[in-house]
Amino acid sequence: MQAKLPKLGILAGGGELPRLLIQSCREQGREVFVIAFKNQCDPATVEDVDHVWVRLGAAGSSIRHLRNSNVTNLVMAGAIKRPGFWSLMPDLRALRFVAGGWLNKGDDGLLRALIRMLEDEEGFRVIGAHEIRPELLSPVGILGSVQPSATTDSSINAAVKAARDLGVQDKGQAAVARDDRIIALEGADGTDAMLRHLIKSGDAQGAVLAKMTKPQQDTRVDLPTIGLRTVENAHRAGLKGIIVEAGSSIIVDRDQVIAKANELGLFVVGVKT
């Protein structure tokens, strides 16, 4: 008899990833409880699952709900728009991060500190979304029917290097390049915001988007992620294709992403660096 999987707590932000993890838990017969962050998580995500709505700064309340629900394992899933101090409204536990200057650090430093607190002080085990749904990770190679041409090699190399350099600085995971020129770098607003800006500016025709793992990041959280919206926005911005880091980047609804990329004439390639 297969051992029962420990109950999973999902700290849910926006996008499709929390929904996919809930689906996986159902398929595995695994109990799940969701902390749905207000103004972050899509209400449709938690319609038919045990959950509670919590504001982002209510760390103490979130931990009490998780304990009361007998959660042992935690996963962080979905996009979080980082709020300003006053909209965060931190409780006493969250104030420790503010007092320690964590909100002024990059995402990676903030997430590492949060994981340490959840594991070392609160006794939870934090796991990665890909440990629950391994097929989320990008494989190596060309993922659809559209292949990059030799003329895109310099754009790919420049975008990958720029994304890597940005990650070393803990400022983002994505970059857009055309030939040897860097067109755009991801900021705190994320990849979709960067692409929306490029759609308006019209500066990215024929360029390539690269999303790469930060060299120093904890791979249990905040892996580079693309989905249908990424592909659609990349097409609207005039890009030729998307490069992701194989084995450590997430493709949400991969089959749909590849089908849409094929339809729009974009290449999607998983690379090892």
Image (cartoon, rainbow, N blue to C red):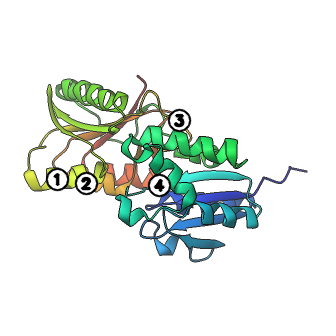
Q: Is residue 232 left or right of residue 83?
A: left
Distance between the Cα atoms at labels 3 and 1? 29 Å
Q: Is residue 23 left or right of residue 103?
A: right
Residue that appears at 56% across and 41% down: 220
Task: Name the residue carrying label 2.
Answer: 193
Answer above or below: position of 176 versus 80: above
Tag nearer the camera, 4 or 2: 2
Between residues 271 and 147, which one lies in front from this camera angle? 271
Distance between the Cα atoms at labels 1 and 4? 25 Å
Instruction: Identify which amino acid the numbered label 2 is placed on.
Output: Ala
State the image coordinates of residue 265 (x, y, percent, origin top left): 24, 47
State the image coordinates of residue 154 (x, y, percent, origin top left): 19, 24
Q: Mark 1, residues whose alpha carbon is within 10 Å: few (<14), some, or many (≥20)?
A: some
Q: Quadrant of the C terminus?
A: top left
Between residues 144 and 119, which one lies in front from this camera angle? 119
Task: Name the residue carrying label 4.
Answer: 253
Instruction: Identify which amino acid the numbered label 3 is placed on.
Output: Asp
Tag nearer the camera, 3 or 4: 3
Tag nearer the camera, 3 or 2: 3
Q: Do the numbered discs 2 and 1 sit on residues whose CB atoms are within 8 Å?
A: yes
Question: Tag 2 or tag 4, which sits nearer the N-term?
Answer: 2
Q: Mark 4, residues whose alpha carbon is within 10 Å: few (<14), some, or many (≥20)?
A: some
**Circle 1 — which element?**
helix
Task: Name the residue carrying label 3.
Answer: 218
**Circle 3 — which element?**
loop
Tag nearer the camera, 1 or 4: 1
Q: In the rendered image, is residue 179 in sight?
A: no
Between residues 187 and 18, which one lies in front from this camera angle? 187
